[in-house]
Image (cartoon, helix red, strand yellow):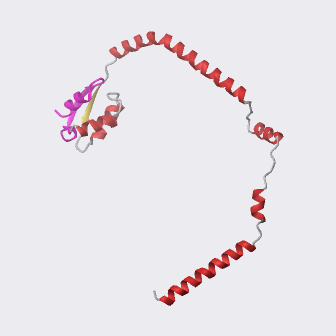
Amino acid sequence: MSKTGFQTFAAGMIVATSLLGGTYLLSDNKSAEANAEKKEVTKSDVESYLTSNGKVSITTDEYEELLAAKDKAVQQQDTKTAEETPQQEESTAEEKKEEVVKYSVTIKSGMTTSEISDLLEQNGIIEDSFDFDQFLIKGNYHQKVQLGTFTVQKGMTYNQLAEVLTK
């Protein structure tokens, strides 16, 4: 661009800025003043709004009392749960001993380790398919997984599962 072109561009910018500035200064600013005005909200306005929306207002003291009552109820519930827990733990331990979940997983050509992990999680063999998938990848078991049907059971470690799937 030539020197004349730059001068013309600069002159156009000055003219445009001047026109916009003059328009702003000479315009009526009543719309800005209208937004600045604040409507006084009365207590009756607040009460009517709350009742129309099915809500109530309470004082800070009442709110703090409710929180304290809630905390007390939670503590009582925890105490009751703690008293019942030993009995429940014994019955749960017996159920876990009796409950042996076995599953026959069939690995087909083209299956990924994440698909295998998802199958094991869906059938209750492992808790987290993502963790098991990462274990297989980090231990390079993902390259050694064999095709076929394998019997696995709940409670096996990731190492045991990987050994079964790579035999």
Image spot of residue 98 (x, y percent)? 33, 14
Image coords of residue 166 (percent x, y): 18, 34
Percent of width and height locating residue 20: 66, 75
Q: Is 7 on the left or on the right of 166, as rendered?
A: right
Report which quarter residue 127 is drawn in. top left
From this viewpoint, is residue 116 visible?
no
* Image: 119 above or below 18: above
Q: Is residue 105 magenta?
A: no
Q: Nearer the viewer, residue 8 or 55?
A: 8
Q: Is residue 95 above or below residue 2?
A: above
- Viewer can see residue 43: yes
Answer left or right for 139 relative to 87. Answer: left
Quadrant housing residue 161: top left
Indicate yes or no whether the magenta region holds residue 151: yes
Q: Answer above or below: position of 124 versus 137.
A: above
Which stretch did the figure color magenta?
140-167
Q: Residue at x 53, y 13 (%)?
A: 79
Name the residue rendered at 77%, 61% in the picture: 33
What is the x, y in percent for residue 120? 31, 32
Picture quarter containing residue 158?
top left
